[in-house]
Amino acid sequence: MSNYVKLDIENGIGTVEFFTEQSNSLPGDILKKLADTITEAGSNPDIKVIILKSGGNRTFCAGASFDELMAVDSPENGKKFFMGFANVINAMRKCPKFIIGRLQGKAVGGGIGLAASVDYCFASKHSAIKLSELALGIGPFVVGPAIERKVGLSAMSQMAMNPDEFYDPKWAHQKGLFGKLYDDAASLDKAVNQLAEKLAAYNPEAMAELKKVFWQGTEHWDELLAERAEMSGKLVLSEFTRNFIQKFKEKAS
């Protein structure tokens, strides 16, 4: 199956789905299309509420594409790649409609950033999370503000300093990243759809104003996330990061 981002609209619900063959890791072109699609859904009057999900059954999102990280050849190109994640987060932040997240499986690195940037996140019992950036020689600079906003600085720091450790979905639920947990995909989808249907019947103006309240204090994120992308863009060129990714790819093959 080829990589894709698609938007389906039904009964006032816009479902944004992304997929890549490498465990839903995100290359630059998919990040751009994802940000653009979320912005498109936010401006479409036929859409009252948005669901964000990924294809496949096992992994919600494995974070950044290692192939593209290895291809970065300058600080400028490094910043450009990480701005892909910044743009998706900011698109969700600025979207005037509520976004419901549907996590069917693990979220790593940037994948946690996506989960933290939706307005309400449902997850399965298989949705363990890992903030892996420090092990790569970088840090969760771009996704950090979104994650900290949801779980607090203490929990975000704990994950960031233990980049090899998967944290249990129950832990993520307790910290506020996940709204509710479900045993299987069927019950997960039922809950996601039920909330989406309810929200689609509410006053769009009231929901838009409430979303502004939810995201109050993040108005500076355009500048903040750009600064963070620049930090990551420089660090990804380090010998440490190059060696880590090369060893990881050799091990995987």
Image: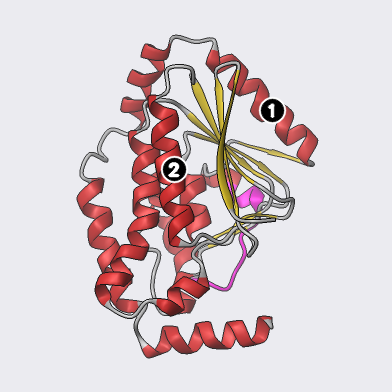
User: From mark 1 to mark 2, how far is it between C-alphas?
Assistant: 19 Å
Residue 50 is covered by the magenta coloring: no
The answer, for residue 99, to whether it is visible in the render is yes
* 192 relative position to 208: left or right: right
**Image location of residue 129, percent across then percent down:** 59, 58
Please tell me which residue lies in front, 14 or 113.
14
Residue 171 is covered by the magenta coloring: yes
Q: Is mark 2 on a helix, strand or loop?
A: helix
* Mark drawn on residue 191: 1
Q: Which amino acid does label 1 sit on?
A: Ala
Please tell me which residue lies in front, 136 or 168.
136
Residue bearing mark 2: 117
Res 121 → quadrant:
top right
Q: What element carries label 1?
A: helix
User: For the point 56% across and 61% down, which residue is it?
Assistant: 25
Image vertical order of residue 105 relative to residue 135, above or below = above
Which range is magenta?
A: 162-172
Task: Return the disc, 1 or 2, that comes first in the chain's sequence.
Answer: 2
**Image location of residue 186, percent across then percent down:** 79, 35
